[in-house]
Image: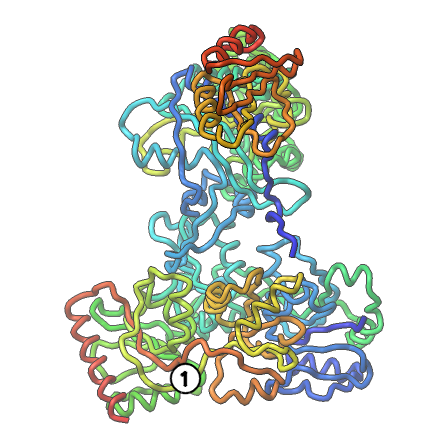
């Protein structure tokens, strides 16, 4: 019988894990630098956390891993976490409510049952949630933070696309749809069905005439939104507050010199967004996204708390980051070889001391070949140590471990501080 | 390779048999539900045929165990709604066996998304029921997958049901109104996708299609119910808070149950009911009765929908194997309807015990297939006996038909072992003996109710010991 992993699941090899940890580490350090604190939520949550209107779209709910657990005789299902934001909002509501502003970040896996193609069903995300702040400045903070992570990862050609859920909803409100059709249309737009809005505006030409330029054009400056506002202010006064809200954040991004593209008819598949939505692309690949979700925590009974957040897609980032950019940051490796059978204890001791001094000390178990520059041979009788430099093809004997260390450190001018 | 076709038993059997007769297949034993599962055709002597419960057929086709199958669209959609990329092709509407799936309730709820308490939906179609709940954006819902009798649940034990009916008028018979019509269905010829693409099935397909009328199916007649027509038969009055809710079994468990009640001096009207009444009257104050499937009882007692139920030890075990923390327990062994739960293999297999099974499994490449109506008992048995890489195939009856081609081991109940022997099978292990039992919930209820429950148990215990 051939052993295989489950369909849609992936293993991460040592090489992939190195990049994974690197990306995760940079995300963690950057978030911590902005004052965010790490949280971790459970893999299993109640299904009903994700089913209420204003959480996940039916399209996404159709791809949730749901099942009855061993307490499931009530008939209510649990799920493998299909989204990372909603559990953090749940955590806030359950245990951080009333404690003021919360800046939270996480690295977590989410599960989506994809039947098609090579898509993986377990996906990793690094993200941050800013809970308790509802300003344009808060939106801008999250965008700047996410861009900083990508910059620190050495990624070039990052494209920022902006839309606004409140604006989309207000525009839909003008189309004379029933509330049910309206929410279905909103779901379709958020599920990435860009045709949806265009189609409806065809059916309702008078509104369509106003909407069409808005939906088809892509703006690059606050001027775009100001022009749209001038055009819509009279015929659609109800969209104005959303345009103003959007404009504030866009103006702030402009001042910070952040480049962006405004594309209203683009969504992200998350119904919980209420305000600005942003997506991050590198080339054709979406590497992350986020937005404002002011109604989510109130709907969980967490009080009138505004919030926004973003997630970066780790799986995509690890395929884009070149680890060479960060080479040299790892500690130097020394292979420790036992030269006489009774020197075993000595060798373990030497390896421990090497690790204490900040080196990676690997015990040679079977005369293995090594890519390490240094090899330390250990004997039971003096001189106990011989240090071999594979680069310079040099072999020197030492009586004490301190002499070995001194030699390593002396030669180690090309080595980053091991401590 | 021989063509394999899966034929339905149950509701489609008569019309399918008639169609195949019209197609001159010359089948020897496909005309009754008597438990013959291997018909042969004079016209197509090489075609391998098996008779399955209709619900099993889409799964058998999707798995590739059979090339062709006949079953109704409702069971096809029940599979596809959860597993849309199943390898199943709907070949042809066969234009018989029409019906529709309705979501129904005793009254049309104003807002399906009751925020707060979960909406309870009982159905033989749990996947479609879940899809309905998600589509309607219900924030909290519980699906009760039932073996049958879903119509008996509302309003006390479920808020809604998803059931099949010929027309919405049939719902009125149950005292319900349609909330939504999910699907119009009829019998379909289906095929495994891969076989359809690679194998010559044309002779069979032609012979079936030639029997069909040429006219296209008419659009279904608009089917609406006037809610004033609803009969009040099933509209039970508000159950008093302290009334003990007792579930009695339908099917062949009815006679032993009546005998027991008689011995206990408890009178009951219209049970077993010839008209399908599921709410018989019992002559004890403070006790109400509903008739449901014994398979569904432990879950219903766990949920507090019923206080007491008469079911089998096998179904209680099945429930507890799935939900070990469930508050259901046996209150009284009724010592009736004794069966053994056994592990069964084909007589052709040179294996006589579980040790032999393990050896057999270790030597083979493919996963070992265990078919059973008792999915959780079978799963636990396979785990406990370390049957390696195994797969449990849930079945809905007629499990004997699965051996030897479509499963390697059955977990089955048997009274005498005769059915097993007749299908050329043999028993290699007995898991346990099962008898009828009275079950209840370990969570405390009210004091009045507890007293009533105690009194009822006492009378039944006396009746059991009286034998």
Residue in the foreground of this view, choosing between B429 and A310: B429
Name the spot of residue A240 as percent of width and height, x first. 48, 20
Secondary structure under the numbered disc 1 in the rendered image: helix
- Most extreme residue toward the front is A381
Q: Is residue A201 above or below residue B80?
A: above
Q: Mark 1, residues whose alpha carbon is within 10 Å: few (<14), some, or many (≥20)?
A: some
Q: Which residue is mark 1?
A: B253
| Pick the front one: B387 or B9 | B387
Looking at the figure, which quarter contains the N terminus of chain B?
A: bottom right
**Depth order, front residue of B363/A209:** B363
- Residue located 59% across and 87% down the image: B34
- Image coordinates of residue B213 in percent, x first then y, are 78, 74
Would residue A143 be visible to someone looking at this image?
A: no
Q: Is residue B202 left or right of residue B389?
A: right
Which color mode does the image show?
Answer: rainbow
Residue at 38% in and 23% down:
A37
Q: Is residue B449 left or right of residue A216?
A: left
Which quarter of the rendered picture does the C terminus of chain B lie within?
A: bottom left
Instruction: Name the residue nearer the viewer: B238 or B404.
Output: B404
Q: In the image, B71: left or right of B295?
A: right
């Amino acid at each position: 019988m051939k052993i295989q992993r489950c369909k849609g699941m992936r293993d991460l090899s040592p090489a992939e894990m190195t990049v994974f940890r690197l990306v995760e580490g940079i995300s963690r350090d950057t978030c911590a630098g902005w004052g965010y604190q790490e949280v971790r939520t459970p893999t299993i949550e109640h299904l009903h956390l994700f089913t209420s209107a204003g959480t996940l779209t039916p399209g996404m709910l159709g791809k949730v891993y749901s099942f009855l657990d061993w307490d499931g005789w009530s008939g209510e299902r649990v799920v493998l976490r299909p989204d990372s934001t909603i559990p953090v909002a749940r955590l806030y509501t359950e245990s951080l409510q009333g404690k003021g502003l919360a800046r939270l970040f996480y690295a977590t896996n989410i599960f989506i049952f994809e039947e098609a193609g090579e898509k993986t069903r377990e996906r990793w995300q690094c993200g941050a949630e800013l809970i308790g702040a509802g300003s344009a400045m808060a939106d801008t903070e999250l965008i700047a933070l996410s861009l900083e992570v990508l910059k620190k990862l050495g990624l070039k050609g990052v494209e920022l696309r902006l839309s606004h859920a409140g604006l989309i909803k207000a525009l839909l409100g003008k189309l004379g749809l029933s509330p049910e059709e309206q929410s279905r249309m909103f779901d379709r737009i958020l599920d990435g069905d860009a045709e949806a809005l265009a189609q409806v505006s065809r059916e309702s030409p008078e509104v369509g005439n106003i909407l069409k330029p808005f939906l088809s054009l892509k703006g690059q400056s606050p001027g775009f939104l100001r022009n749209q506002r001038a055009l819509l202010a009279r015929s659609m006064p109800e969209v104005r507050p959303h345009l103003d809200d959007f404009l504030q954040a866009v103006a702030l991004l402009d001042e910070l010199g952040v480049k962006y593209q405004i594309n209203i008819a683009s969504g992200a598949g998350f119904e919980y967004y209420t305000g600005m939505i942003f997506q991050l692309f590198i080339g054709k690949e979406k590497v992350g996204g986020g937005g404002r979700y002011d109604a989510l925590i109130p709907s969980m009974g967490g009080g009138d708390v505004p919030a926004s957040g973003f997630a970066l897609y780790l799986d995509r980032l690890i395929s884009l980051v070149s680890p060479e950019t960060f080479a040299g940051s790892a500690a130097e490796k020394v292979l420790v070889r036992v030269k006489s059978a009774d020197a075993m204890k000595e060798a373990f001791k030497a390896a421990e001391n090497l690790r204490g001094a900040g080196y990676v000390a690997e015990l040679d178990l079977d005369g293995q070949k090594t890519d390490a520059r240094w090899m330390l041979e250990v004997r039971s009788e003096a001189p106990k140590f011989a240090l071999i430099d594979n680069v310079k093809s040099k072999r020197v004997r030492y009586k004490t471990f301190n002499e070995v260390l001194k030699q390593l450190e002396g030669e180690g001018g090309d080595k980053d501080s091991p401590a | 390779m021989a063509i394999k076709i899966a034929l339905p038993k149950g509701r489609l059997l008569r019309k399918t048999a008639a169609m195949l007769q019209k197609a001159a297949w010359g089948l020897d034993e496909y005309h009754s539900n008597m438990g013959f599962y291997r018909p042969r055709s004079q016209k197509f002597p090489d075609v391998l045929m098996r008779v399955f419960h209709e619900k099993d057929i889409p799964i058998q086709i999707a798995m590739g165990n059979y090339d062709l199958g006949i079953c109704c669209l409702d069971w096809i959609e029940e599979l596809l709604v959860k597993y849309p990329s199943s390898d199943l092709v709907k070949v042809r509407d066969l234009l018989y066996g029409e019906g529709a799936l309705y979501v129904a309730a005793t009254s049309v709820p104003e807002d399906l998304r009751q925020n707060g308490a979960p909406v309870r939906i009982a159905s033989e179609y749990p996947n479609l029921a879940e899809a309905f709940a998600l589509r309607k954006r219900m924030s909290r819902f519980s699906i009760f997958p039932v073996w049958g009798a879903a119509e008996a649940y509302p309003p006390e034990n479920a808020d809604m049901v998803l059931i099949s009916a010929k027309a919405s008028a049939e719902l009125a018979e149950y005292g319900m109104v349609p909330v939504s019509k999910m699907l119009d269905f009829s019998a379909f010829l289906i095929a495994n996708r891969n076989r359809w693409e690679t194998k010559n099935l044309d002779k069979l397909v032609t012979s079936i299609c030639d029997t069909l009328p040429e006219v296209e199916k008419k659009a279904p007649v608009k089917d609406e119910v006037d809610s004033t027509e609803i009969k009040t038969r099933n509209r039970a009055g508000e159950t008093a808070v302290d009334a003990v809710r007792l579930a009695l079994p339908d099917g062949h468990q009815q006679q032993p149950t009546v005998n027991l009640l008689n011995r206990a001096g408890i009178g009951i009207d219209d049970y077993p009911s010839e008209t399908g009444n599921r709410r018989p009257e019992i002559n004890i104050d403070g006790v109400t009765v509903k008739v449901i499937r014994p398979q569904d009882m432990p879950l219903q007692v766990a949920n507090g929908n019923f206080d007491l139920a008469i079911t089998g030890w096998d179904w209680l075990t099945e429930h507890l194997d799935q939900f070990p923390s469930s508050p259901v327990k046996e209150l009284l062994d009724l010592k009736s309807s004794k069966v053994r739960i056994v592990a069964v293999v084909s007589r052709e297999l040179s294996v006589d015990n579980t040790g032999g099974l393990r050896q057999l499994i270790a030597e083979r490449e493919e996963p070992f297939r265990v078919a059973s109506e008792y999915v959780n008992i079978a799963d636990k048995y396979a785990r406990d006996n370390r049957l390696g890489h195994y797969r449990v195939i849930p079945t809905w009856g007629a499990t004997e038909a699965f051996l030897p081609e479509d499963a390697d081991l059955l977990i089955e109940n048997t009274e005498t072992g005769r059915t097993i022997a007749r299908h050329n099978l043999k028993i290699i292990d007995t898991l346990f003996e099962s008898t009828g039992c009275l079950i209840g919930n370990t969570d405390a209820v009210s004091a009045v109710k507890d007293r009533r429950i105690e009194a009822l148990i006492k009378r039944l215990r006396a009746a059991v010991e009286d034998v």
